[in-house]
Amino acid sequence: MRFSLRLTSGSGEGSRLVTTAITADTEHRSSGLPLGEYTLTVRAINSYGQQGEPATTTFRINAPAKPATIELTPGYFQITAVPRLAVYDPTVQFEFWFSETKIADTSQVETSARYLGTGSQWSVSGPHIKPGKDFWFYVRSVNLVGKSAFVEVSGQPSNDGEGYLEFFREKIGKLHLAQGLWELIDNSQLADEMAEMKTTITETRNEITQTVSKTLEDQSATIQQIQRVQKDTNDDLAALYMLKVQKTKDGIPYVAGIGAGIEDTDGQPLSNILLLADRIAMINPESGNSTPLFVAQGNQLFMNDVFLKRLFAVSITSSGNPPAFSLTPDGRLTAKNADISGSVNANSGTLNNVTINENCQIKGKLSANQIEGDIVKTVSKSFPRTSTYASGTITVRISDDQKFDRQVMIPPVLFRGGKHENFNSNNQQSYWYSTCR
């Protein structure tokens, strides 16, 4: 059994023969084919040279279509891009490029943006992926044949303020500095009155500890200063400094401390300064002033006067009950008194007791329960012109300064007349009638 192969390019009358082949194999490879649409016709040939019915298939060798959509998923200091084709193609992957600024001409992407890699999706993360800032992805489809045009999409990382605090809580909790700062001082091993310096040198840790402690009846107070250099399980060194004060009363420990350290986080050295206290405040003693610059207490930060270059807030609420001003995450703005000098664009709403000082143009339909003003004009004319003869013509000319058309309504004219008798100079009698004609 052999097979006759016939490969043509194009379709219809414009098709042309590319190659033919006779083979006994069940596979055949054609190489060096240019981009385009092809039709392959296969016939089976028996030992007598007779050919069977043809089997035909059509295929294309083309660069892939560009992504139809790119979905951006915001995260904490992270954005994930997931492109999708209009029609799924398992042979297509995506090439990802990234820029912190918009590239005006996509032909400059390869020289202006940063190449991330090739795959089905890609995430960028790090402290430079800041909330409230736009970042740009440039994505194109790739296969063995070629690449599509770039598709641009921009997005921002998460703006969930509460979620960021939880994110930092988890990250900080893994630090050696935080674990050492939160660790309680074991007063059970200390004398009632003591002050000592202890040096510890081991294979994984070099440390100097200074401790001062005093006990009085049911309470004790301890101050401890720790200078430590240690090695973790990844053979990364960490340098830590901690100053802790602790008071134990009725068996309950109360701790405050400050720590500074440098250690590796996610493979990169990161410096940290941590404060541990029920209340944190900064005071400027200039001119005897004792009012704090700021106070942090009970998961709140209190500040007297703030000058910010840029503020990014999930929601804003003024003081007062109820607040005089508020802006919610869904874009709802509430203000008791607002003076707006610029333009206002709105799709719906309600206005009460509003005065429009200058011109107003309504392009749609106006519905009103009551209208006062120059909507209807009434003009009266006497008719007939003489009261003795009911005949004549009146012409009404309309002169209006409005752009819209007016409807002119003329009510019916009613005239009631009578028969009149008259004698001329020859004393001849005649009659005339005062009626409408």
Image: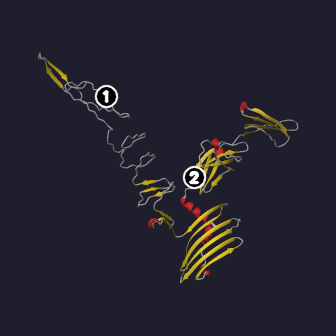
Q: Quadrant of residue 219?
A: bottom right
Residue flagged by tag 1: what amino acid is it?
Arg
- Quadrant where the N terminus lies? top right
Circles 1 and 2 in contact, beta carbons < 8 Å: no
| Numbered mark located on residue 345 in the image | none
Does any portion of residue 86 appear in the rendered image? no
Residue 149 place in picture, x, y as percent: 65, 42
Residue 310, percent from left and from top: 51, 54
* Colour option used: secondary structure
Please state, as top left, top right, bottom left or bottom right, where the C terminus lies in the image: top left
**Label 1's element?**
loop
Which residue position holds label 2?
Answer: 156
Q: Which residue is mark 1?
A: 397
In terms of depth relative to the viewer, which is nearer, 337 or 371? 337
Q: Is residue 403 above or below residue 68?
A: above
Q: Nearer the viewer, mark 1 or mark 2?
A: 2
Task: Pick whichever, 87 or 138, lies toward us.
Answer: 138
User: Type of residue at label 2?
Assistant: Gln
Q: Is residue 212 above or below residue 68?
A: below
- Give percent across and percent down for residue 4: 82, 37
Work out whether mark 1 precedes mark 2 in sequence or the reverse, and give the earlier one: 2
In the figure, residue 14 lies in which quadrant? top right
Q: Please tell me which residue is depicted at 17% across the width and 21% down the height of the picture.
A: 431
Number of residues whose C-alpha sits closer than 10 Å to that of mark 1, classed few (under 14), some (14–19) or many (20 or more) = few
Q: Give the residue at the far top of this rendering.
A: 426
Residue lying farthest to the right in this orientation = 47
Residue 58, compared with residue 275, is above or below; it is above
Q: Is residue 53 left or right of residue 424?
A: right
**Residue 199 in view:** yes
Residue 368, relative to residue 392: is it above or below?
below
Q: Is residue 139 left or right of residue 316?
A: right
Label 2 packing within 10 angstroms: few (<14), some (14-19), many (20+): many
